[in-house]
């Protein structure tokens, strides 16, 4: 097996468990692709949790795209499996992996167990994507596993400064840093996106039964408590009650455990016919090209990929001032940030963009340019590689002792 002392250029495995597709998976896949495009030895280790069901597993595999060249796919129906632990460790050994980069608390737990049992002797890095759980026994257990793993990890990356500062426990052995997520641009220039918006909106309208003459507002994400969709629905209800009609196409893009509850809430509010619940959408390119504005209503975030995605398509955003949002959006210049759960401030930002298409276009172009200058995948990968090097040097005595 290669150790860090024998392999100065690290071979990296991005390791995650998942039953469905979301922001964490986008980050792991995107980072792996970016590192491989730089000629680096990088693999994706994805454990598909079959307990989530065939539909959600299907969403995951479809959305991962063409990953066969660089992915190791494992499957499990158990919350913990020692045979799986051995299978992953054996493959790490065969591929001479020297850095395991974990993207969820479970992969971190497995990585540290592999080291404890002498099945893996490289370094372990963990990215905090943001983990806030409701109260309860399972949540307490997950948090304890994560705290233990954070204390043992050689390096910890926060996807935002807020996530890192709020989640990193004391007495951690390794190094830590904040690295904001990044994304590939869909077009080399924003002009093509802006000039093609009307045609793309017509295509989106035909797909979801919308009025192509009206702007399209989207809220994107898993339908869960964190995303605070009741605030979005209340915004829609207020807009309709005050305007007498709905001069906007409202979309809620995503699936999740709260979909039926949210549809019932929209029905009780009298707006069920005014908001489209799209369900899971695998080809988000068409949605972003045809939309005019992203509204986000989350209670908390890491650095949400939908925010970067929308901005990469020259869309302005109205988003809460939480997590990495404050690192990405320049409020009043290329988007609007508002206090969490503040309906009045949310509506103020929304109205500004709906009332003036020129401001939408100007802020959308600036958002694109900011992604281009500050959130490209090349610099993202280089920052990770620099951090790996620092972690390897810092962990050298520990690795040599384990070896």
Image (cartoon, rainbow, N blue to C red):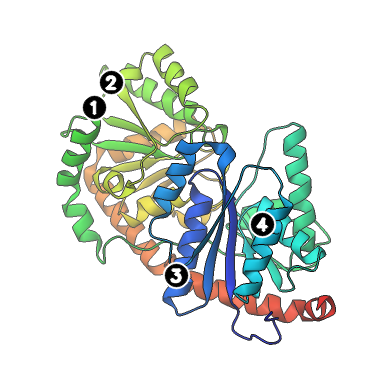
First in residue order: circle 4 vs circle 2? 4
**Number of other residues with Cα within 10 Å of mark 4, as a class: few under 14, some 14 to 19, many 20 or more:** many
Disc with the residue nearer the chain's start (3 vs 4): 3
Q: Residue at x 64, y 79 (%)?
A: 389
Q: Is residue 346 left or right of residue 127?
A: left
Q: Dot 2: few (<14), some (14–19), or many (≥20) neighbours within 10 Å?
A: few
Q: In the rendering, at what x and y percent does residue 22 appear? A: 49, 47
How much space separates mark 2 and mark 3, taking CA atoms?
A: 46 Å
Q: Which residue is mark 2?
A: 243
* Quarter of the rendering occupied by the C terminus: bottom right
| Label 2, label 1: how far apart the Cα atoms are | 8 Å
Q: Position of residue 321 (x, y in %)?
A: 53, 45
Of the two numbered discs 1 and 4 in the rendering, the one whose residue sits closer to the viewer: 4
> Residues under labels 1 and 4: Cα distance?
41 Å
Separation (CA) of disc 3 from disc 1: 41 Å
**Residue 34, which numbered label?**
3
Please say if the residues under marks 2 and 1 sit with CB atoms less than 8 Å apart: yes
Q: Could you say which is closer to the camera, residue 399 or residue 259?
A: 399
Task: Indicate which label's residue lies in the foreground, 3 or 1.
Answer: 3
Q: Earlier in the sequence, mark 3 or mark 1?
A: 3
The answer to whether 321 is drawn above or below residue 149 in the figure is above
Q: Are marks 2 and 3 in contact (CB under 8 Å)?
A: no
The nearer-to-camera label among 3 and 4 is 3
Mark nearer the N terminus (2 vs 3): 3
Q: Is residue 199 above or below residue 240?
A: below
Q: Secondary structure at mark 4?
A: helix
State the residue position of label 1.
247
Task: Identify the secondary structure beneath mark 3.
Answer: helix
**Of tags 2 and 3, which is closer to the observer?**
3
Q: Which mark is residue 164?
A: 4
């Amino acid at each position: 097996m290669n150790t860090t002392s024998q392999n100065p250029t690290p071979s990296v495995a991005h390791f995650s468990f998942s039953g469905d597709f979301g922001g964490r998976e986008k980050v792991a896949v995107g980072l792996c692709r970016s590192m491989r495009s730089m000629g680096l030895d990088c693999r994706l280790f994805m454990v598909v949790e079959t307990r989530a069901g065939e539909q959600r597993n299907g969403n995951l595999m479809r959305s991962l795209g063409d990953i066969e060249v660089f992915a190791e796919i494992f499957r499990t129906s158990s919350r913990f499996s020692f045979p799986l632990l051995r299978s992953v460790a054996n493959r790490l050994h065969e591929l001479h992996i020297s850095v395991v980069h974990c993207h969820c608390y479970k992969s971190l737990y497995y990585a540290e167990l592999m080291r404890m049992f002498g099945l893996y002797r490289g370094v372990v890095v963990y990215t905090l994507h943001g983990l806030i759980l409701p109260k309860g026994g399972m949540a307490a257990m997950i948090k304890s596993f994560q705290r233990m793993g954070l204390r043992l990890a050689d390096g910890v990356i926060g996807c935002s400064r807020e996530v890192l500062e709020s989640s990193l426990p004391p007495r951690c052995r390794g190094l830590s840093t904040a690295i904001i997520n990044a994304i590939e641009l869909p077009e080399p220039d924003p002009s093509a996106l802006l000039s093609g918006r009307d045609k793309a909106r017509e295509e989106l309208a035909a797909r979801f039964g919308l009025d192509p003459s009206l702007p399209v507002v989207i809220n994107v994400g898993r339908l869960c408590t964190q995303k605070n969709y009741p605030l979005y629905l209340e915004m829609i209800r207020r807009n309709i009650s005050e305007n007498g009609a709905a001069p906007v196409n409202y979309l809620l893009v995503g699936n999740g455990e709260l979909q039926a509850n949210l549809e019932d809430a929209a029905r009780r509010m009298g707006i069920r016919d005014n908001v489209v619940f799209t369900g899971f959408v695998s080809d988000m390119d068409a949605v972003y090209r045809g939309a005019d504005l992203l509204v986000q209503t989350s209670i908390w975030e890491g650095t949400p990929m939908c925010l970067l995605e929308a901005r990469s398509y020259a869309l302005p955003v109205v988003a809460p001032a939480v997590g990495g949002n404050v690192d990405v959006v320049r409020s009043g210049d290329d988007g609007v940030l508002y206090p969490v759960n503040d309906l009045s401030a949310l509506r103020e930002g929304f109205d500004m963009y709906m009332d003036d298409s020129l401001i939408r276009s100007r802020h959308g172009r600036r958002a694109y340019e900011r992604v281009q200058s500050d959130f490209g995948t090349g610099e993202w990968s280089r920052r990770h590689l620099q951090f790996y090097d620092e972690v390897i040097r810092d962990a050298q005595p520990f690795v040599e002792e384990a070896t």
